[in-house]
Amino acid sequence: SIAGQDYAGKLRVIVVDDGSANRDLLGPVHKIYASDPRFRIILMAKNVGKRKAQIAAIRSSSGDLVLNVDSDTILAVDVVTKLVSKMQDPDVGAAMG
């Protein structure tokens, strides 16, 4: 659902595989998105927990805004656009759906 966003701005997606036990099954999925220049795949050697995986993604990011979603989250196509528009207000420090 991230790949299908209608967001007109620059979109960079960092996928963190936190030591998936079924990584061999995920390999083809990783390869599909590895060829998409918007995506970067981080393969962690072992499971270190959600918070450390989030930190790895944030440290690898360089954008003005960071959207954090779980792998089982399905977003409507306009979510990024709507969240970015909310962040244009200087009184808003975070937005969530």
Image (spheres, grey):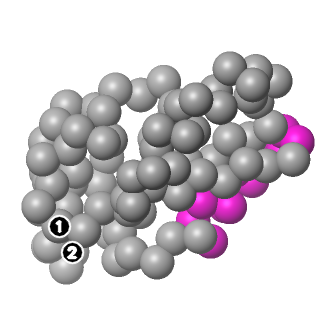
**Residue 70 position within the rendered picture, expressed as x and y whole percent measured from the top left:** 51, 35
* Front residue of this view, candidates 59 and 30: 30
Residues drawn in magenta: 46-59
The residue labelled by disc 2 is 91
Left or right: 16, with 87 as reference point: right
Three-letter amino acid code of the residue under disc 2: Asp
Name the quadrant of the C terminus. Answer: top left
Q: Residue at x 68, y 41 (%)?
A: 17
- Where on the picture, by quarter, is residue 60? bottom right
In this view, the mark in front (1 or 2): 1
Q: Residue at x 66, y 54 (%)?
A: 42
Q: Helix, strand, or loop for circle 1?
A: loop
Q: Earlier in the sequence, mark 1 or mark 2?
A: 1
Number of other residues with Cα within 10 Å of mark 2, as a class: few under 14, some 14 to 19, many 20 or more? few
**Residue 4 position within the rendered picture, expressed as x and y whole percent measured from the top left:** 23, 39
**Residue 39 position within the rendered picture, expressed as x and y whole percent measured from the top left:** 45, 55
Q: Main secondary structure of the magenta part?
A: helix
- Mark number, residue 9: 1
Say above or below: 11 vs 2: below
Residue 94 visible at all: no
Say above or below: 74 vs 61: above
The reply to whether discs 1 and 2 touch (Cβ–Cβ < 8 Å) is: no
